[in-house]
Structure formats: C-alpha cells, structure tokens
Amino acid sequence: MFFNMYNRYRFKSTFFLSGSIMDPLKKFLVSPTKSAANQIKLKNWDPQYSWNKSKIDTEIEMEQFSKKISELQYKLFAANNKSLLIILQGADASGKDGTIRQVMGALNPQNCYVKSFKVPIETELAHDYLWRIHIEVPSKGQIAIFNRSHYEDIIEPSVNNLISKDHLILRCKQINDFEKYLSENGTTIIKFFLHISKDEQKRRLQERIQDPAKQWKINESDLVSHRNWDKYMGAYEKVLSSCSRKWAPWFIIPANVKHFRNWAISYIILKKLENLKPEFPRVVLNPSDFIFD
Amino acid sequence: MFFNMYNRYRFKSTFFLSGSIMDPLKKFLVSPTKSAANQIKLKNWDPQYSWNKSKIDTEIEMEQFSKKISELQYKLFAANNKSLLIILQGADASGKDGTIRQVMGALNPQNCYVKSFKVPIETELAHDYLWRIHIEVPSKGQIAIFNRSHYEDIIEPSVNNLISKDHLILRCKQINDFEKYLSENGTTIIKFFLHISKDEQKRRLQERIQDPAKQWKINESDLVSHRNWDKYMGAYEKVLSSCSRKWAPWFIIPANVKHFRNWAISYIILKKLENLKPEFPRVVLNPSDFIFD
C-alpha cells in the first residue's frame, strides 16, 4: 500500500508487456443475448480455470491494479456524480467473504461499503423484495458491494419451489427493469457469480468443520444446500441467462483457484472504473475570495 | 497487502527491537482527570512533533501494524460480540480524509464503514442532536469510523455563540453519559483530535487553491473558519478537557507531519484492538450432523 517494492518485477509481467491475450471482460461475460429460452450451461464453464497464472504473478499484478483502483476511486469520490455497484453471488463457500477481504480490502472505506444481505427480517418481508435493496444502493461518488442481493429472491424460492415458474420469470424481468433504471441514473453495475465445483464446495465445508478458525462459519444449512447442489446450479443458470444485460452484465468467475478469482475480479473492476473516466471537478476559483490574515 | 517484502528491514526497526521508549497511548492521551475547570492548553501540545521518525520507518512499521490490525479485525467480526467506534475531529484541512485513506484503507470493508457527518439536514434537525449519531453506531463485530461527529454540536454552536455556556456544559455531560452507555454495551470508543498549527492550515488551504486536484475540496467557509482559528481552538480545549474519560478517551495527535500522524493513529488502533482480545468463537460441532454425499 505505502510504497512499491515490486518495480523490479515489472519486466517479468508478460501480461502488461504483451497486452492481454485473454480478456476477462470477454471470456467470463455472460452474453446479453442469452435468455430463459437460450440458457448457458454451467458445466461448460470450467471452475478450475486459472490461465496457468501463478499465485505470485497474480499478486504482483494485483498490487498494480489496486493502486490504479485506489486512484480512480478517489476521483469517483471527488467527481461525486456517478456510482458503482458490485454484486457478489455464489454457492455457500464459493468465496464471497474471501473476495471482499482480499480484493475489496484495497478500497478506501471513505466511499466504499459492503452490505451483506441475510435472510429477510420482519420489516423487510413486509415490503416488496426490492425495497431493502433500493435503500442500500450507492449514492453519487460511492462504491457499494453487495454480498448476496436481490438474486437470492429468485434463487431460494426457485430451489425450494416456493413460487411458480411464471412468477420467477416475472421477477427476472422486474430485476432487469430495476437495474436498468439504476444504470440510467448514474450507477454502473457489475455482477460476479463465483463458480466453484461441487467437489470444491465439499472440500471447503470439510475444512470448515476441521479448522478451529473456521468452525464458526458452518452450520447445518450448508449441508442441506450442498445436497441441493444441482437445484442451485439450475436456478443460477436461469438467472445468469435471463439477467445478464449490457447495463448490468453477469461475469462467471472461475473460483476454485482463489488467487485467480481475486485477480480476475480485480481486473474487471479496474476496467469498469477506467471506463467511467472519473475526473476531479473543475472549479473556477476567484482568488479574491480567498484572503488570508 | 499481499505479501511482505519488508522482512529485510526487520532488524532496522529499533521501535520493535528496543520496545517503546515513547508510548503514544500515554503521550497523546488527554488525562481523564481534566475538566472544564482544569483545561488543557493546546499551545502546550506540539503539532509538529514527530519523534524524529522518518517517513520510511513509519511506513515499514505501519505495514506490520496493518497486518495485525487486519487479523484482529477479522476475529472481531467472527466473535460478533463487541464493536469499535473511532471518532475523528479536527480543524478544516487537519487531515481527517487523508487519515481515513491512508490508515483506515487497510481495514476490510466487510465489517468497517465510514460515516461522514455533514451539516444536519431537516429530518436530523427535527430530532435531538444524538439521534443521527445513535443510528450510525457500529453493530456487534463492526468497526465504525466517524468523520466528524456529535462533537460538532458543541464546537460549532460554541464558536458561533449559538447556545449558552450552561447549555454547552450540559451537552458535554450528555455526551459523556451517551458514550458511557455505549461502552457499557460493548462498544470501545477511541477519539482522535488531529492537531495542526494555524500556519499549517494556511499552507494546506493555499495548496488547495493552487492544485487542480485539490480545488474541489475548498470553499469560502474554510477561510471563515481559518479566521476564527482561536475560537475553534478554545472550543476544542473545552471539549477535549470535559469529554476525555476512561471509557472514551481523547488523543491529541500531532498532525502537521502526516506520516507521523498516520503512524500514531495506526499504533493506537492496534493497541486498542489487542486489548479487546477478539477470538474465533468456540463451536461444539457434532460430526454426525455433517454427512456428505
């Protein structure tokens, strides 16, 4: 964070020298042409993919990404006219918390916050399902990170057969409209699905059972959701296909390999922030207004 | 953040080898025995003080502090039974935003947020002055950073002669009671006053006028408050003396030298977190509850 000891690695990083051979913005994007009738299949997306990038290489590059992200974040704050909403979804143990700690930790909390959406409480259930979401969207100049989101209101009812197929389709449409409205009003939206394999989930849950530093993270419901793996993936295929739109794209991030997951997400956030082109506001100062003693 | 290249400096850091010769927890603390009748004098506190610590030394040590703070923050989150409230106050251009960016940037936004209190809006004014503050106090497991706070409700009225002396004394008492109540209910409170000199404020304001990347931060009210320097310092002397209590101590941080300011604040936060001794919750797991396919 404070000074850069990595310069000596600069010329080892082929990624920066040769330009991008593999562009995460394209490779992991769910095409906006997908729909409920023309769904993606998660089995065609490799959760183990890591582009043969070593841990050390991704970390060196991420230091550079983080530095640029920090500068852009500060300009976004100063410009105070646009906002960024990052949505994280994924199965239990897919790495949502770890991503926040390892990727978003580099962000300045002055204009960045994380909202974790849990099982809705009474007041929330008394409202429409987007009510509690709308309250938490970022204001101008801010970056919000949603750890789970309104997509839980499709995934959970879908897995547990709580609402009809027609109702699920309706919700997808409502969410697309809501996100479009937000984007028309200055919010850039990026959605990450952390894609792990069923075996990797099992491995991570078993680790949580055994590691005293991780036991607090597990409860029996995790096992239930592990048993329902196929239903969850089916629900995600619907959502990812129906709700990836150009104003709020879904990215399917290979997440078995944690350092690659972090690298890909960090890269995509950087590119989206660069596209926003935030600038310090131009202020026309009248020096005669500023007279010191 | 990602890996530590500073090990080779380890043995150059006399601070860690020889133990603390100067303890910021003591040196910068406003004694809880102070009161309105027995006030501190800010002219006796040197804003330029930096313990002859070089920028590079503070940065190397802060890397180590940050790493430890991150670990303790994660345990605080896991333990989910206590919270930390950090209050930043100081004159315009005293470095509140910079402190947040450079010190608090190391915190994980998952369980840390910044609340900046501006001039109260209509709904806020319609309530008692602690109403908007209480809403924002950290929940269990969280760290909140207040950029300005309820102390503005003493400083501003005091400087502008808006409420009587008796009323100011009453507010100090109410704030002490409020903070005591919070601490009795699991919130550790640390309050930092960023202490700069009048000349340093002038220098920073002039820099804001001249630097295109900083012009957005200045407005005419900054000049008014510069002219009222003595009144502000007088109001702060009252507040610092009347409201430093063992459950919510004030620290007067020398803030002319930015890298020392960052170092001292980082050190104090680390020590306070260490005192909290957060631990991962002990969970008694019944392996028979966890049967995989």
Image: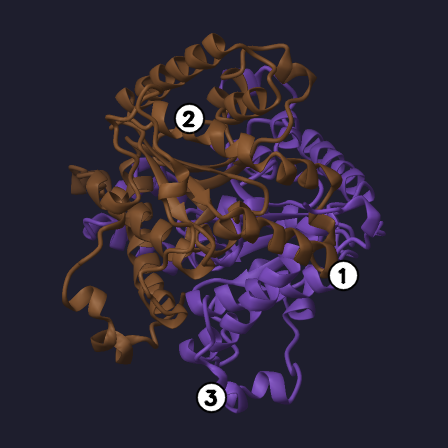
Chain colours: A purple, B brown
- The answer to which quarter of the image holds residue B2 is bottom left
The answer to whether marks 2 and 1 sit on the same chain is no
Task: Find residue A265 and report its horizontal and vertical position in percent.
Answer: 56, 62
Q: Which residue is mark 3?
A: A8
- Name which residue lies at 57% across and 59% down: A42
Amino acid on which disc 3 is placed? Arg
* Closer to the camera in the image, A251 or B68: B68
Whether residue A257 appears in this view of the structure is no
Instruction: Tell me if A4 is positioned left or right of B120 in this view.
Output: left
Q: Which residue is mark 2?
A: B239
- Mark 2 to mark 3 CA distance (whole Å): 50 Å
Q: Chain of mark 1?
A: A
Q: Which residue is mark 1?
A: A277
- Name which residue lies at 48% across and 29% down: B234
Instruction: Tell me if A67 is positioned left or right of A278 in this view.
Output: left
Task: Find residue B270 and report its horizontal and vertical position in percent.
Answer: 29, 49
* Quadrant of image for the N terminus of chain B: bottom left
Whether residue A184 appears in this view of the structure is yes
State whether residue B282 is above or below residue A48: above
